[in-house]
Amino acid sequence: MRRRLLIYLAGCFYYSGLVALARWWTRHAGKRVIIVNYHTATGGAFLQHLLYLRKHYRIMPVEAALAELYSGSVMLSMCQGKKDRRTPLVVTLDDGYTDNFSYGMQLAHDYCVPLSIYLIPGYINSGQRFWWFEGKYMARHTAVPEVLLEKQTFQLQHEDGRVAMAQFIDERTRHATSVAERETFLTTARELLKLSSSSTQSEQDREHLPINWDQARAMEQSGWISFGAHTMHHPILSYLSDASEIKREVTECRQVLEQKLGHPIRSFAYPVGQEQHIGTAVVQAVQEAGYDWALTTTYGFNTPATDPYRLKRIEADVDQHWLIVAVASAGLWGFIAHMRWFPFIRKNFTNASYKKGL
């Protein structure tokens, strides 16, 4: 019901002309860069989204768009070879899922849409599932009827118990105060649940894996994919108790990416990326690591006055109807979300990275 209502509202804004008016206002209000953020590329309407965005915005790689925002020059359109006065828009994908290679790269090439992807080198090195999928994976693959995890007992014969355990694992790993603590907990949970690294993987499980280095290099060679840094192991940085680990996660990530890819890495994306997941110490670590820009998931547009280490993004999902993306990219959800009589819009569009992917 809620999904239908959101699509209905988006349709009203779009077909009434409000979306077009908002795009016009943005184009004439001064320099802006819109950054739209995804995670996975398959399983939804990603192509429809890209076709809409390509029609109405000047889609650029993140480095080119931000260099233009903070300088003054207007870059050439990659496909048209001429100046394009439409509002610049960047399409980012966080984490580096394998479908970014198998599907996203082909779309980028076929439709002249540059994509900017934020990678986690520790997961590329290990080839393991991202930690935020571990709870559901364990719930699906365990054969034990009951488990005791950190003084909490879960009955696993029924779906409710498996769901509760998956949620517990997710919360425990999400709020870990170090990567070592997180990985120790996951190892213990796998052992108690009688899981092994050789457990049979479904197609869904394989979709939750990262790309490898060969794929990353092939993506760059396509000319349509650029990469940024997303920490070494994807902890939520503000939850880490040791300042030296924050620095290491941010700095080592850049060093490894530059070594593997052979060129400077200029931009960084904070894991999860809302203000409570960042904080002053984290921003300082990113600055000291030598990045030029850092991206949050705070909703909004970017202007030359925007802090380059707190750049805003619009969270999107491939499962959303293209009308919702049209309204969000025009900035209208942000206006409506502040109205008290639309609290569910605020809930659905201010922290999408918590709901699907990170």
Image (spheres, grey):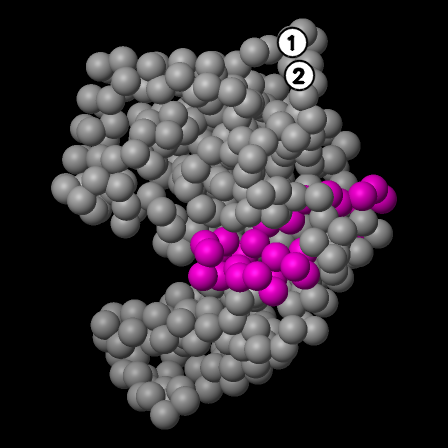
Give the residue at x 37% y 30%. 331
Give the residue at x 30% y 70%. 163
| Label 2 neighbour load within 10 Å: few <14, some 14-19, many 20+ | some
Task: Please identify the residue farthest to the front as the structure is shown.
Answer: 305
Eye-nearest disc, 1 or 2? 2
Residue 347: x and y, percent?
27, 49
- How many numbered circles are shown? 2
Residue 125 located within the stretch drawn in magenta:
no
Quick check: marks 1 and 2 in contact, CB under 8 Å? Answer: yes
Q: Say what secondary structure mark 2 lies in.
A: loop
Give the residue at x 21% y 46%. 344
Q: Quick one: 99 or 69, which is closer to the camera?
A: 69
| Label 1 neighbour load within 10 Å: few <14, some 14-19, many 20+ | few
Residue 334: x and y, percent?
33, 36
Question: In terms of image quadrants, where is residue 123?
Answer: bottom right
Depicted 146 relative to depicted 302: above or below: below
Residue numbers of the magenta segment: 260-286
Q: CA distance from mark 1 to mark 2?
A: 7 Å
Residue 24: x and y, percent?
40, 14
Q: Which residue is mark 1?
A: 83
Residue 120 image label:
none
User: Label 1 is placed on what type of residue?
Assistant: Lys
Which callout, 1 or 2, points at the residue further toward the start of the chain? 2
Looking at the figure, which quarter contains the N terminus? top left
Residue 276 located within the stretch drawn in magenta:
yes
Question: In terms of image quadrants, where is residue 137?
Answer: bottom left
Q: Which residue is mark 2?
A: 74
